[in-house]
Amino acid sequence: MAQPPISRGFRGRKPPVQSDRIPPGQHLVHDFPVLSAGPTPHAPLSEWSFSLDQGGKALKEWSWEEFNALPQTRLKTDIHCVTTWSKLDTQWRGVSIDDLLKAAGLAEPPGDFTMAHCDGDYTTNVPVDDLAGGKGMVATHFEGEPLAPEHGGPARLLVPHLYFWKSAKWIRTLEFLDSDEPGFWEQLGYHIYGDPWQEQRYAGD
């Protein structure tokens, strides 16, 4: 895949805000900035599906209607973007990774790491320990409304304790892996893990 242009939001820093809820180097925003590595896809819901995969094979797949019939989780949380903005008290609804595992009949995750695969050929890696135990979800709603396409709708991964590029937009597959592998931004120099409180923005941080 050809390297897309980096949005202007992926560059530069603004003065930080001091707060016990805002990680080092971040500043508070009240809007919801839109940052994407490429154009916004618009998949018809009738053609949308989500799957848990391992070794290139689907362990379980859901249509849009089936996915929305799964148990729903609501979450109020702060989010932090690698471009230095933080947004507090955001409200989400979706299906937790724990409930997806249960719905797929999996007693435990079939690997220690995951790769999120999304429309637009975007990928990002997240350890299972950062998704299970109530830490991650596939979100379909934001602030009580269906998730807008520019913010990752109809569904995005949500891993709020990591930098927000890990909360991959337009997710379609969560693949379980035995070893950690870099995704799209990680291959281009972003940190393999991305902890905001450690300022793990780029490789070597």
Image (cartoon, rainbow, N blue to C red):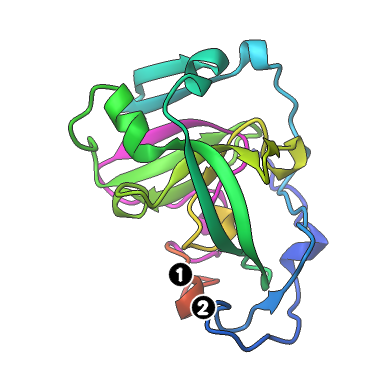
Determine whether, in the image, residue 79 is placed left or right of residue 146: left
CB under 8 Å between discs 1 and 2: yes
Q: Nearer the viewer, residue 1 or 33?
A: 33
Determine whether, in the image, residue 95 is placed left or right of residue 15: left
On whether residue 179 falls in the magenta region, the answer is: yes
The residue shown at (48%, 19%) is 69
The residue shown at (41%, 39%) is 96
The residue shown at (72%, 64%) is 10
Quarter of the figure that contains the N terminus: top right
User: Where residue 186 appears, x then y in whole percent?
Assistant: 51, 57
Label 2 sits on a secondary structure element that is loop
Determine whether, in the image, residue 165 is placed left or right of residue 100: right
Q: Residue furthest left?
A: 107
Q: Is residue 164 above or below residue 105?
A: below
Q: Nearer the viewer, residue 19 or 127?
A: 19
Residue bearing the label numbered 2: 199
The three-letter amino acid code for the residue at tag 1 is Asp
Label 1 sits on a secondary structure element that is loop
Residue bearing the label numbered 1: 195
Q: Which residues are magenta?
A: 167-192
The residue shown at (63%, 56%) is 90
On whether residue 66 falls in the magenta region, the answer is: no
The CA distance from mark 1 to mark 2 is 6 Å
The three-letter amino acid code for the residue at tag 2 is Glu
Q: Is residue 107 above or below residue 36?
A: above
Which class describes the residues within 10 Å of circle 1: few (<14), some (14-19), or many (20+)? some
Q: Nearer the viewer, residue 131 or 185?
A: 131
Which class describes the residues within 10 Å of circle 2: few (<14), some (14-19), or many (20+)? some
